[in-house]
Image (tube, helix red, strand yellow):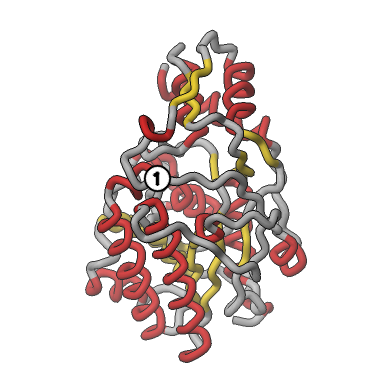
Amino acid sequence: MNSSAQSSPKTFLITGGAGFIGSHLSKYLLERGHTVFALDNLSTGTMDNIHDIRSNPEFHSRFHFVRDDIMNEMVLDRITSQVDIVVHLAAAVGVQLIVEKPVHTIETNIMGSEIVLKTALRYGCRVMLASTSEVYGKGVKIPFNENDDVLLGNTGKSRWAYAASKMIDEFLGLAYYQEYGLEVVPFRLFNTVGARQTGRYGMVIPRFVQQALRGEPIRVFGDGTQSRCFCDVRDVVGAIYGLSLHNEAPGTLFNVGSNEEVSIMELAKRVKTLSGSSSEIVTIPYSEAYPPGFEDMQRRMPDSSRIQNLIGWKPTHTLEEILRSVIDFERHRIA
């Protein structure tokens, strides 16, 4: 894919296209004149997420939603034959789901990616392969760099099934690039947040905001000293898009995240203040919050210099802006 092709309209397939990130990416691409096939089995995605897209007459001829599973190779083949770029976002996500359903996690992530890569190779499509900061495991060298060695917990802890499965995805994607010349761009997402994210699977910001707006206790798991860097989904989709069109991106792994670090206890306090909530903040031991098999990571901060150097990307939304947008969204949703 040469740089001169960057401005011409492309056709994208987004697996997990009705999910949180997938729906934002769909709209972002459509607004820039591209055509989008969104494939989603609606196990975690929802039709509500793509309601604005489907009701916009400007997008009717360029947005195609297919309710099916990436495991359905016949459907995947039919769609992939019509596209230039596949953005593979469909995955088992969320700490709670991962700990409770490790078999589903491993099978969905590894087998799903294998089918996507195999099908993309048949038609010569570029593949944007979503991975996760979970891959850095118990790393303590901050910030996390793409070339760092990784340390995962033992296989008796199902918490690490997700990280291991996504690491296999990366290995497989890069192997397709090295062995077959398939243009694969793996990228590790760090705590992507924003409007439409569900708190159903342990996502912390929507969970805190929903609890604050309902006047329920804001439940901090652990002692709250663990910290994260949250990146607005509006910034993340711009990063994915920029990498998808750059001719030097294939075969290279990229971190995609923010460097604005916050402890989970401080996050709870900020949510309480910004929402004007009277909720109390309570700590819940991990043993009560999650089934056996959970371990946490104390810090998670990306070194994003690689993507910044290649495409000039860096986040533009602050944590306060993110929290205000989620609070506004949840207020309207609850009302």
Q: Position of residue 310 (x, y in %)?
A: 73, 69
Question: Would you say 52 lies left or right of 66 here?
Answer: right
Residue 260 seen from this side = yes
Q: Nearer the viewer, residue 281 or 73?
A: 281
Which residue is at 54% across, 29% downward?
223
Residue 162 left/right relative to 239: left
Towards the viewer: 237 or 218: 218
The vertical placement of 219 against 280, above or below, is below
Task: Confirm whether residue 62 shows in the render.
Answer: no
Q: Residue at x 34, y 79 (%)?
A: 119
Q: Which residue is mark 1?
A: 294
Q: For the C terminus, which image quadrant?
A: top left
Query: Is 227 rendered above or below residue 58?
Result: above
Q: Position of residue 147 (x, y in %)?
A: 65, 70
x and y percentages locating residue 57 in the rendered image: 43, 46
Position of 266 with respect to 21 (left or right) is: right
Instruction: Name the residue: 32% across, 43% down.
Output: 292
Above or below, 65 against 220 in this view is: below
Task: Tell me residue 77's x, y (percent).
Answer: 29, 75
Q: Quadrant of the N terminus?
A: bottom right
- The secondary structure type at the circle numbered 1 is loop
The amino acid type, in three-letter code, at marker 1 is Phe
Front position in the image: 292 or 217: 292
The image shows a total of numbered marks equal to 1
- The residue at 49%/23% (across/down) is 283
Is 134 rendered above or below residue 95?
below
Residue lying at the far top of the rendered structure: 278
When asked about the image quadrant of residue 122, the answer is: bottom left
